[in-house]
Amino acid sequence: MSEVLVLVEHAEGAVRTITGELLTAARRLGSPAAVVVGVPGTTDSLRADLTALGAEKIYAAESDDVGKYLVTPQVAALAAAAQGASPAAILLPNTVDGKDIGGRLAVRLGSGLIADAVDLDAEGVATQSIFGGSYTVQTKVTTPAPIVLLRQNAISAEPQAGAGEVTALEFSVDPATATTVTAVHVEPAGDRPELAGAQTVVSGGRGVGSAEQFAVVEDLADALGAAVGASRAAVDSGYYPQQFQVGQTGTTVSPQLYVALGISGAIQHRAGMQTSKTIVAVNKDPDAPIFEIADFGVVGDLFDVAPKLSEEVKARKA
Amino acid sequence: MDIAVLVKQVPDTYSERKLRDDGTLDRAAADAVIDEIDSRGVEIALQLTEQHGGEVTVVTMGPDRATETLRKALAMGAHQAVHVVDDGLAGSDALQTSAALAAALKTLTFDLVITGNEASDGKSGTVPAMLAERLGLPSVSSARAVSVDGSTLSAEKIVDGGYAEVTASLPAVLSVSEKIAEPRYPNFKGIMAAKKKPLTTLGIAELGLENTGGAAAPCQVVSSSPKPPREAGQKVTDDGTGGSQLAAFLAAERLI
Ligand SMILES: Cc1cc2nc3c(=O)[nH]c(=O)nc-3n(C[C@H](O)[C@H](O)[C@H](O)COP(=O)(O)OP(=O)(O)OC[C@H]3O[C@@H](n4cnc5c(N)ncnc54)[C@H](O)[C@@H]3O)c2cc1C
């Protein structure tokens, strides 16, 4: 059976959830082969988890250069693995880095690329959900070694232990195309789930009124065990950081429950959340477009409704 | 420093966007505008050339009417424009688009190529990296701030959960995020001047492209279908019990 290469997303010695989803998709097409790109020793710390998630083979692409340079080490490692293995497909997460790695790799290998897939079948046909989920498109790549970028949280991981056999992989980075990373500023994720993969998202809009008052949104999110999101107007007004923006030009979310507080429901906001399973909204304006797509809407002041809801949720939990 | 900025004409995100039966974009269905992210790319290019000297060339690939987008960028202050246009390019996928744009860029001299991080219609976000690979250049994606010192580009780029500070040597490819800059509005003088600025068109033959167009695309659409729109559910007006009613709804749906 042909190998299907999966780029392993990892941080601080742990495998990220998208990796399990990618290995599950890989198993539909062939034999899952995880490619670990990291500093020496990384593969050792990830091996048990990758094996449990389904990796039959684990390529250890280790070098002190990883982390110093943006994406080019991953491109070089995946290209080296692909040249040896003639894989049935190469699967990457649909993240900022995943797109950069996939784009370069597609040119290097002459492979067609499908971005932002929400599903992938055994024939290699990928499903995409476009224009904010208003169309479903199925696409197939006609070249060898198709590259597919899979959206986080779109398919669920079904761990099934593999052999987890480790093979060292040699690769080198061309300094001419390298971009050097001089500092990374990442805020600790805290206890809240990651926005893109969260089961519940509570978002605040311009109606929240200030950065301080976003505490109301955070309180409800914490009561529900949810991630916090924000509209572009809330981000532009400085109420909440940009990485939490939901919508056309922000993160696309598709949780079980989406709570919109003080958000009008502009088409560009809807583009990032309208495939959520259940949508509820609180807005002062009875004609706000968000109500057109809400399963349950409350016309009212979010500063009255959201704290009440938080209390009730906490009471029900206790 | 000379900068090439890639711009794309897209269906206005404020209007309803549609696909044709063959899975390609129905460009007639919606108003066509310069993609907002690209107007930010033009803005930052203008700011960089205002600081360091040099000229801005805007480059687009698209049907005849995409010249409107080039004129818009010229009216903002770009110096000249290149339009990659050929019926044989219709239906190109990301890999083919990057090949055509790379070929067009090779006809220019530049120190920096600026693109949007992701078009609002295709949303693949992979063309900037493909271009960098084809041109053999370093790349920085999703920049929220950028500066140039001599032949070094420094940028803050968005990463999961925050941002990173990065440097690359010029020439390089830079894709910008929407936090990079607020685009200026063209004034009357700019609009008049844009009509006289040089605009070059390049086709498949001039660029020496092979395997162009939808039929030769490495990515083939198998099928496409519109999703039924969502329907509005229940709406209540808060009389003091809105929070409790919402909680009851969520409990009934087993969401809490
Ligand atoms: C190219 C492009 C890309 C874009 N991308 C995005 C994107 O990714 N994400 C995004 O969100 N937007 C995006 N937008 C912007 C979008 O068009 C809207 O401007 C934005 O979504 C509005 O945010 P909002 O709903 O928070 O603000 P507003 O539209 O100002 O709505 C605020 C709402 O709060 C309500 N309100 C006020 N006070 C209260 C209160 N006390 N209690 C209850 N309700 C209250 C008001 O009735 C109003 O409906 C994009 C626009 C463009 C052109």
Image (cartoon, coloured by chain):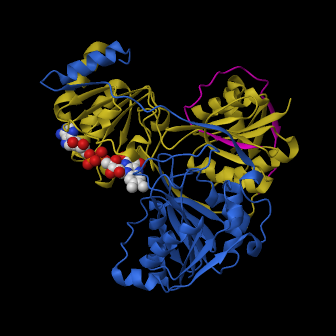
Chain colours: A yellow, B blue
Give coordinates of residue B231: x percent, y percent: 37, 28
Give coordinates of residue A307: x percent, y percent: 21, 28
Residue B123 is one of the magenta-drawn residues:
no
User: In the drawing, does residue A223 fall left or right of residue A304?
Assistant: right
User: Taking B122 as reference, is A252 above or below it?
Assistant: above
> In the rendered view of the protein, which quadrant contains the C terminus of chain A?
top left
Q: Tell me which corner region of the image, top left, top right, bottom left or bottom right, holds residue A40.
A: top right
Instruction: Name the residue located 32 percent from the left edge and 34 percent from the top edge.
Output: A292
User: Taking A71 as reference, is B182 above or below it?
Assistant: below
Viewer can see residue A240: no
Residue A154 is one of the magenta-drawn residues:
yes
Viewer can see residue A171: yes
- Predominant secondary structure in magenta? loop
Q: Tell me which corner region of the image, top left, top right, bottom left or bottom right, holds residue A273.
A: top left
Instruction: Name the residue located 23 percent from the left edge and 38 percent from the top edge.
Output: A287
Give coordinates of residue B114: x percent, y percent: 55, 68
User: Taking B39 as reference, is B95 above or below it?
Assistant: above
User: In the drawing, does residue A305 fall left or right of residue B212?
Assistant: left
Q: Which residues are magenta?
A: A146-172
Depth check: give the residue in front, A187 or B85.
B85
Give coordinates of residue B168: x percent, y percent: 61, 68
Instruction: Name the residue located 77 percent from the left edge and 53 percent from the top edge.
Output: B216
Instruction: Name the residue located 77 percent from the left edge and 49 percent from the top edge.
Output: A111
> In the rendered view of the protein, which quadrant contains the N terminus of chain A?
top right
